[in-house]
Image (cartoon, rainbow, N blue to C red):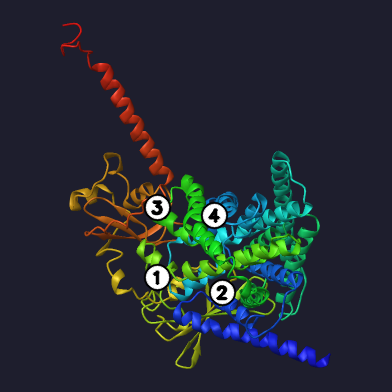
């Protein structure tokens, strides 16, 4: 028995270490990291090194706990500002989009497999949710800086679509396991009622749980080393409590993280670092366990249908769902196309595919194997093409800031303040003489090994170490002041135009000087207001507005979304590559209006044309 403990520990830790080392390969070659984790699990399993692991209950339990940890960390790191910016389109994708994907994919699965209709929709529900971890690892590894709205939409969608897919999958497994053929109307009613009950209970417990986590952290004087473990344990308590009363535990734990992460919780920096490490560990363990549970020797007999379904999901079901969901939100075609492609399937899909095995369904193992192959094909095909597609569609923007040398130091006994240690880098605004704002309190400057008061140092110089006492929810303005100028890629040197223009000047001046195409009612608007009006009120960094002979580019915005700097390009950017599908809501509306206008024009022309006789003369001639 004692030797078994050592052996299991040795094998388990060796697999985790191997997975951790594989991240170096992924960062070096841009490979999808989660694919490597799965690969290590497969290589170590029954058809590889011979480790036999076929306990579906343990695999599902480990995967569910790991997913709860990941979702809490995802909610904790999602700012409310991001939620306000892209919340509605992302939540539409996470709810209606998951439903559309399930139905469309299920229809294809019915005709490509020998499954029943319910089993086909079950497979569709299992693969309907996306995996954020794979997508954003690739973005970081490839140094891909996406447009803010696109990134925010993908982040929120991937963090909120898991509970919907989980509900659909478990409900369908229970219905199929009963064996009776359900009435369609009753099934639909049960699904709708069950969905709202689970979501409402999960949301209520999640919001309440997040509030209680914050209050307990504030009131209890816990040891600094114990605090992160305490918060993580409370998050799992919220997850378990919601599931025990019939709610969605996964939605609850995500919302608890969202509430806690956006509150004035104590020791927020320590919590973020700890949860980031625990999230990585959870992902590694979950993918290793799911890889061990798979049996590649069973794949050949279903690999063809699985690959066809994977291609159908990538090229038909997901794009159709994304297009239908984003029609009301005026996303450009390029952004809609990218969001539809970045629908990588991952651990959640494999985890949900275990539920048919747990339910004892006749085709449960086949459903799991097909879902596993779909995930592998998604990680390989979509995972390696995220970066090139983003560049092809023109969604890459230059980095806003350059390198930043900062250390966050939490102060004992201080609930809502911390000490930030910045090293002044060459080329940063403070090195050029820009003042530190009044709400920040610089307490110490270290220059050439000598410690001095900030008031006695004069102008800051490159290489100085500055210690500033700030609230722990300090504005990000400090980072901008101490960051160096971003290194712009050669291809992006002209991205922001040849020079800047004063955003407070009137748009009419652009007409007089550059011959810009501006409407009469826009002449008296400021340049900033003109850009905001052309972009329908939403402005973000790197937005571009074409005015005929010139382009205006947003070089910088403040924390409230106000335009701070505008670039002008006298060589308008080439049009983005054509995307033949994904018409936006505005384009559909314009086309309908033009069609109706042409029809009404033809009708009026027919009415105005006098009727003619057989001789070709008007009837009244």
Residue at position x 29%, y 21% from top?
604
- Tell me the number on the disc at residue 333: 3
Give the vertical position of 315 relative to 64 (above or below).
Answer: above
Residue 290 versus residue 491: which sits nearer the camera?
Answer: 290
Badge 2: few (under 14), some or many (20 or more) residues near its Cα, within 10 Å? many
Callout 2: SS: helix
Quick one: label 4 or label 2, which is nearer the N terminus? 2
Q: State which mark lies toward you, 1 or 2.
A: 2
Q: Position of residue 518 (x, y in %)?
A: 26, 45
Q: Position of residue 91 (x, y in %)?
A: 57, 52
Residue at position x 18%, y 52% from top?
513
Q: CA distance from mark 4 to mark 3?
A: 16 Å
Q: CA distance from mark 4 to mark 2?
A: 23 Å
Q: CA distance from mark 1 to mark 2?
A: 26 Å
Label 1, on which residue?
399
Residue 541 versus residue 11: which sits nearer the camera?
Answer: 11
Label 2, on which residue?
34
Quick one: label 3 or label 2, which is nearer the N terminus? 2
């Amino acid at each position: 028995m004692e030797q078994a403990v050592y052996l299991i520990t040795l094998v388990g830790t060796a697999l985790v270490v191997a997975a951790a080392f594989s991240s170096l390969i992924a960062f070096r070659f841009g490979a999808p990291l989660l694919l490597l984790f799965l690969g290590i699990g497969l290589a170590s399993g029954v058809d590889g090194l011979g480790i036999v692991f076929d306990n579906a209950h343990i695999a599902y339990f480990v995967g569910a706990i790991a997913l709860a940890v990941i979702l809490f960390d995802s909610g904790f790191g999602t700012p409310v500002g991001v939620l306000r910016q892209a919340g509605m389109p992302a939540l539409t994708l996470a709810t209606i989009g998951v439903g559309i994907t399930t139905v469309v994919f299920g229809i294809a699965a019915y005709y490509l497999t020998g499954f029943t209709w319910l089993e086909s929709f079950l497979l569709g529900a299992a693969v309907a949710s996306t995996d954020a971890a794979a997508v954003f690892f690739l973005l970081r590894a490839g140094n891909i800086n996406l447009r803010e709205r696109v990134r925010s939409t993908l982040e929120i969608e991937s963090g909120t679509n898991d509970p919907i897919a989980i509900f659909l999958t478990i409900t369908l497994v229970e219905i199929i396991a009963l064996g009776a053929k359900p009435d369609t109307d009753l099934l639909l009613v049960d699904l709708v009622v069950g969905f709202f009950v689970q979501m409402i209970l999960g949301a209520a417990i999640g919001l309440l749980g997040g509030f209680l986590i914050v209050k307990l952290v504030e009131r209890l004087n816990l040891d600094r080393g114990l605090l992160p473990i305490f918060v993580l344990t409370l998050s799992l308590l919220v997850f378990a409590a919601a599931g025990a009363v019939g709610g969605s535990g996964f939605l609850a734990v995500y919302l608890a993280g969202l509430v806690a992460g956006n509150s004035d919780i104590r020791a927020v920096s320590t919590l973020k670092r700890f949860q980031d490490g625990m999230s990585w560990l959870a992902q590694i363990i979950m993918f290793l366990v799911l890889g061990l549970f798979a049996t590649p020797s069973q794949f050949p007999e279903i690999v063809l249908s699985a690959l066809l379904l994977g291609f159908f999901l990538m090229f038909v079901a997901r794009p159709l769902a994304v297009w239908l969901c984003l029609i009301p939100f005026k996303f450009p075609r390029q952004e809609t196309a990218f969001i539809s492609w970045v629908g990588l399937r991952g651990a959640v899909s494999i985890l949900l595919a275990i539920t048919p095995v747990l339910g004892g369904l006749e085709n449960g193992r086949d459903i799991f194997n097909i879902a596993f192959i779909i995930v592998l094909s998604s990680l390989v095909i979509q995972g390696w093409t995220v970066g090139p597609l983003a560049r092809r569609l023109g969604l890459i923007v230059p980095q806003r800031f350059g390198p930043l040398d900062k250390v966050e130091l939490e102060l004992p006994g201080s609930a809502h303040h911390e000490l930030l240690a910045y090293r002044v880098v060459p080329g940063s605004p403070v090195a050029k003489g820009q003042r530190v704002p009044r709400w920040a309190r610089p307490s110490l400057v270290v220059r050439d090994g000598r410690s001095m008061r900030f008031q006695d140092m004069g102008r800051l110089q490159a290489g100085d170490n500055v210690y500033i006492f700030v609230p722990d929810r300090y504005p990000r303005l400090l980072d901008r002041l101490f960051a160096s100028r971003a290194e712009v890629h050669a291809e992006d040197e002209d991205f922001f135009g040849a020079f800047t223009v004063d955003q407070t000047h009137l748009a009419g001046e652009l007409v007089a000087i550059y011959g810009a195409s501006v409407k009469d009612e826009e002449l008296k608007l400021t340049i900033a207001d003109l850009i905001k009006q052309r972009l329908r009120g939403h402005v973000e960094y790197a937005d571009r507005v074409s005015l005929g002979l010139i382009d205006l580019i947003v070089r910088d915005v403040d924390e409230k979304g106000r335009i701070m700097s505008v670039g002008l390009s006298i060589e308008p950017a080439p049009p983005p590559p054509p995307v033949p599908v994904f018409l936006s809501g505005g384009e559909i509306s314009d086309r309908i209006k033009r069609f109706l206008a042409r029809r009404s024009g033809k009708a009026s022309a027919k009415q105005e044309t006098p009727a003619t006789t057989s001789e070709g003369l008007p009837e009244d001639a």
